[in-house]
Image (cartoon, rainbow, N blue to C red):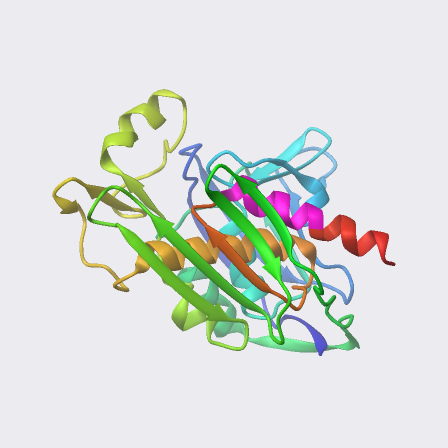
Amino acid sequence: MQQHTIAGEITQAGVGLHSGVITNVRILPSEPDTGRYFVRVDLPDLPIIPAQVAAVNQTLLSTQLGKGEACIRTVEHLLAALAGMSVDNARIEIDGSEVPLLDGSARVWTESIAQVGLVSQPISNPVPWVVKEPIWIYENDAFACALPASTTRFSYEIDFALSAIGNQWHSWSLSGSFAQEIAPARTFGLLHQIEHLQKTGLIKGGSLDNALVFGSEGLVNPPLRFENEPVRHKILDLVGDLSLLGTFPQAHFLAYKASHNLHIQLARKIWELQLAKV
C-alpha cells in the first residue's frame, strides 16, 4: 500500500485529561518515510518526539512519549485516529505536554482528518510483518497477545464488578471503518475512584463532558454512543498504542482486562522480534 499524509492542516485545542492544561495542536502534512511525530513548539530548539514504541517512557493511565527532557502525554487517541485513518506521515505540533482529550474519544480527530482528506505518496509501506507464533504478555489474569491470523484484527474483553459495565467483548478488523465503529467510543471511569485519582494528581482535566462516568446506580452522564462503548474504547487505546510500531503486523491482537502498560509491553516484544529477524 502507498503511504499517505494529510492533504491540509488540522488544528484543535483543548484540555489535557491529567494535566488540566489547555494545549493547541497543529497537524501538518509530512514527507514520505518520516512517520508520525510530535514537535514541542513551546520548548527551545523545538524538540521532536517520534511516535515510536522506543520513545515510550510512562504508561500510567495513558501513554507518554519522551526524548531527552521533552515529553508528550496521552497520545493514544490521536495516534489511533491517524493510524486508523491510514495517515502514515504527519507532523504534530503541540504547545504543551499533553494532547487535548477533546470529547474523550477519537471522533474529533477522525472527522478532522476526513475533512482535509489524504494525499497518496510515491513510496509504499513495507509488507506487514507476519506473526507466525503466539506472542503473550500477562499480569495476573490480565493479558495482551498477538496471534497468527490471515488478517489484522483487534479483539478485547473487559470484566468489571460494577454491573453498569460488567463483562463486555468486541472485535474489530483493520478492514472495517475505524471512524464509525471505534473512534466515537469515549474514555470511561468509575465514580468511586475519581476522588483518589484527583488526590494523586491525575485526571485534573476530566469532566462529564469528556469521559463516561459509571457509578453503582449506573451511567452518570448518559446516553451511550454504543451499547458496549467502554470495551470499544479499550480497542481504541490498543490501536493507538500498537500504532507506535509504525505499521500494524498481520496478527490477531487479543487483550483481556489489559492496560496501557500491557499494550506497550506487547508492542516492545513485537518490536524486538522484528529487529531480531531483520
Left or right: 62 in relation to 229: right
Front one among 131 and 60: 131
Left or right: 66 in relation to 219: right
> Residue, x 55% and y 42% (percent of image)?
138
Left or right: 106 in relation to 165: right
Task: Tell me if residue 24 comes above or below residue 240 in the rendering.
Answer: above
Query: Percent x, y for residue 277?
Result: 85, 57
> Residue, x 47% and y 66% (percent of image)?
110
Q: Is residue 94 visible?
A: no
Q: Is residue 266 magenta?
A: yes
> Residue, x 28% and y 64% (percent of image)?
226
> Residue, x 54% and y 47% (percent of image)?
75
Query: Percent x, y for residue 22?
Result: 43, 39
Query: Percent x, y for residue 202?
Result: 40, 29
Q: Is residue 232 visible?
A: yes
Q: Residue furthest right?
A: 278
Query: Percent x, y for residue 107?
Result: 40, 62
Q: Residue furthest left?
A: 217
Range drawn in magenta: 259-269
Left or right: 222 in relation to 116: left
Task: Tell me if residue 205 comes above or below residue 176 in the rendering.
Answer: above
Q: The C terminus appears in which quarter of the rendering?
A: bottom right
Principal SS element in the magenta part? helix
Q: The N terminus appears in which quarter of the rendering?
A: bottom right
Task: Tell me if residue 1 comes above or below residue 166 in the rendering.
Answer: below
Query: Residue 45's image quarter?
Result: top right
